[in-house]
Amino acid sequence: MVHPSATIATETTISQGAQIMAGAIVQVGAVVGVNTGAQIDHGSRVTAHCHVAPGAVLGGDVSVSERCHIGAEATIIQGITIGAGTLVAAGATVIGDVTAGARVAGAPARAF
């Protein structure tokens, strides 16, 4: 499902069952599992059963493993890996890799 107001670059891969909601921007080379209303930049990968909330920004080459939640207005800088089952709280600024199952919040993001 892709909302008509979403902007999707031509060289992207959208997995079966993905939901690209209103206002989403998916850049060249991105591979998307499931996300809503966020910016996912070049070369980033969001895998199955993930939710990227409205206003979240994934810089280039971010890798989000399965079963993750990236909260509203969270920012993940380029080149970061988010482990499986991770929660990134709303408004967090992630500047380093996050291990599987972690819960992070704040700016810079820290475990809680």
Image (cartoon, rainbow, N blue to C red):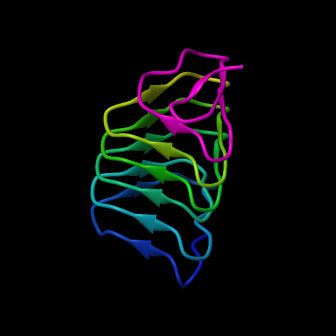
Q: Residue at the location (62% across, 70% down)? A: 21
Q: Position of residue 42 (x, y in %)?
A: 29, 52
Residue 48: image quadrant is: top right
Up the image or down, 68 lies above or below 23; here it is above
Q: Residue at the location (65% across, 34% down)? A: 68
In screen coordinates, is 20 left or right of 95?
right
Q: Which residues are magenta?
A: 86-112
Q: Position of residue 60 (x, y in %)?
A: 31, 46
Depth check: 58 or 96 in front?
A: 96
In screen coordinates, is 90 left or right of 107?
right
In the rendered structure, does residue 73 fall within the stretch colored magenta? Answer: no
Q: The N terminus is located in which quarter?
A: bottom right
Up the image or down, 28 lies above or below 61; here it is below
Depth check: 98 or 33 in front?
A: 98
Q: How many marks?
A: 0
Q: Position of residue 5 (x, y in %)?
A: 53, 83
Residue at the limit of the structure toward the front, as seen here? 107
Up the image or down, 106 lies above or below 84; here it is below
In the rendered structure, does residue 94 fall within the stretch colored magenta? Answer: yes
Q: Main secondary structure of the magenta part?
A: loop
Q: Residue at the location (44% across, 67% down)? A: 25
Q: Position of residue 109 (x, y in %)?
A: 55, 29
Residue at the limit of the structure toward the bottom, as seen here? 4
Q: Residue at the location (55% across, 75% down)? A: 23
Q: The C terminus is located in which quarter?
A: top right
Depth check: 16 or 28 in front?
A: 28
